[in-house]
Image (spheres, helix red, strand yellow):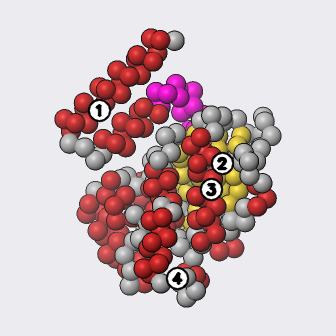
């Protein structure tokens, strides 16, 4: 359950009631982002994408936010993926691709320098699982199901799944998930390393909050630098990654000595 020590407050300079498809709340240093379309299994439509694109900079820039937790409304889904009801009304694929790159939501997620936890309950499919893979840590409820169903629709993953998943799990597992479009359950997701932990569904939010608070007990600058080392190092040869780690540690030590 969310801590109630401090009342939740709205996004700075933004009327939270203006959001139709997400809920943004801050409680004791934790930003809670709720995908709020439970009747549509929290499917990502254009409006939700736009609202997330507005909220994420607040998570990045608000000094009171120490960590973020992303979850889905209701108990059926984290997110069932892109809203296919928009497929017939959306712009052409060329225009849609241009919009995607002009408003790169997934790149925005990856740019958050603070710890981000995905609390995954129920379905995490397509864009839903791709969003979760942009988070640092993934907790799953025992009823969670995961999949990239694009092949069934004659498509390939378009929100980074073919690139982010190989950075989380082994290549062979990625190929099987993408090529078959099959769903996997929470136990299989844990076995292959897609999620960090499974908890009973009724304990999912409290477990996510407890983990966030444990992380927040550490030095925030050290956490920022550690996240930078981990994420940037993935794209570097080992020797360059080690040099970067040493450089970041030296900068951090210099800052600490000046205090």
Q: Position of residue 76 (x, y in %)?
A: 63, 67
The answer to whether residue 93 is above or below residue 237 is below
Label 3 to label 2: alpha-carbon separation? 14 Å
Dot 2 falls on a residue whose secondary structure is: strand
Q: Position of residue 179 (x, y in %)?
A: 31, 75
Label 2 to label 4: alpha-carbon separation? 31 Å
Nearer the N terminus, badge 4 or badge 3? 3
Left or right, 185 with respect to 39, comes to left
Q: Nearer the viewer, mark 2 or mark 4?
A: 4
Dot 3 falls on a residue whose secondary structure is: helix
Q: Local crowd at mark 1 within 10 Å, few (<14), some, or many (≥20)?
A: some
Q: Which mark identifies residue 244? A: 1
Label 3 to label 1: alpha-carbon separation? 31 Å
Q: Is residue 186 visible?
A: no
Label 2 to label 1: alpha-carbon separation? 31 Å
Left or right, 114 with respect to 154, comes to right
Q: Nearer the viewer, mark 3 or mark 1?
A: 3
Do the numbered discs 4 and 1 sit on residues whose CB atoms are within 8 Å?
Answer: no
Q: Is residue 150 magenta?
A: no
Query: Observer-nearest residue: 134 or 212?
Result: 134
Q: Which mark identifies residue 94? A: none
Quadrant in the picture for residue 257: top left
The residue that appears at 41% across and 22% down in the rendered structure is 252
Start-end of magenta stretch = 207-223
Nearer the N terminus, badge 2 or badge 1? 2
Residue that badge 2 annotates: 32
The residue that appears at 60% across and 72% down in the rendered structure is 45
Q: Position of residue 140 (x, y in %)?
A: 53, 54
Magenta segment, prevailing SS (helix, strand or loop) = helix
Nearer the N terminus, badge 3 or badge 2? 2
């Amino acid at each position: 359950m969310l801590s109630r020590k401090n009342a939740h407050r709205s996004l700075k300079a933004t009327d939270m009631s203006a959001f139709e498809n997400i809920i943004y709340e801050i409680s004791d240093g934790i930003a809670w982002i709720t995908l709020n379309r439970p009747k549509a299994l929290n499917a990502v439509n254009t409006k939700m994408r736009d609202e997330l694109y507005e909220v994420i900079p607040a998570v990045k820039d608000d000094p009171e936010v120490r960590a973020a937790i992303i979850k889905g409304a209701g108990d059926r889904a984290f997110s069932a993926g892109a809203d296919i009801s928009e497929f017939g009304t959306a712009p052409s694929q060329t225009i849609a691709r241009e919009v995607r790159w002009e408003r790169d939501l997934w790149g925005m997620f990856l740019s958050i320098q603070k710890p981000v936890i995905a609390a995954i309950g129920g379905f995490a499919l397509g864009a839903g699982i791709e969003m979760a893979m942009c988070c640092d840590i993934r907790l799953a409820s025992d009823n969670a199901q995961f999949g990239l169903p694009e092949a069934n629709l004659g498509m390939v993953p378009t929100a980074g799944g073919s690139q982010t998943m190989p950075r989380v799990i082994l290549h062979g597992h990625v190929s099987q998930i993408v090529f078959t479009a099959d769903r996997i359950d929470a136990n299989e997701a844990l076995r292959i390393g897609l999620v960090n932990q499974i908890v009973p569904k009724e304990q999912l939010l409290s477990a996510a909050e407890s983990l966030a608070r444990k992380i927040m007990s550490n030095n925030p600058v050290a956490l920022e630098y550690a996240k930078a080392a981990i994420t940037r190092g993935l794209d570097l040869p080992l020797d360059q990654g080690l040099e970067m780690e040493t450089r970041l540690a030296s900068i951090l030590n210099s800052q600490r000595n000046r205090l």
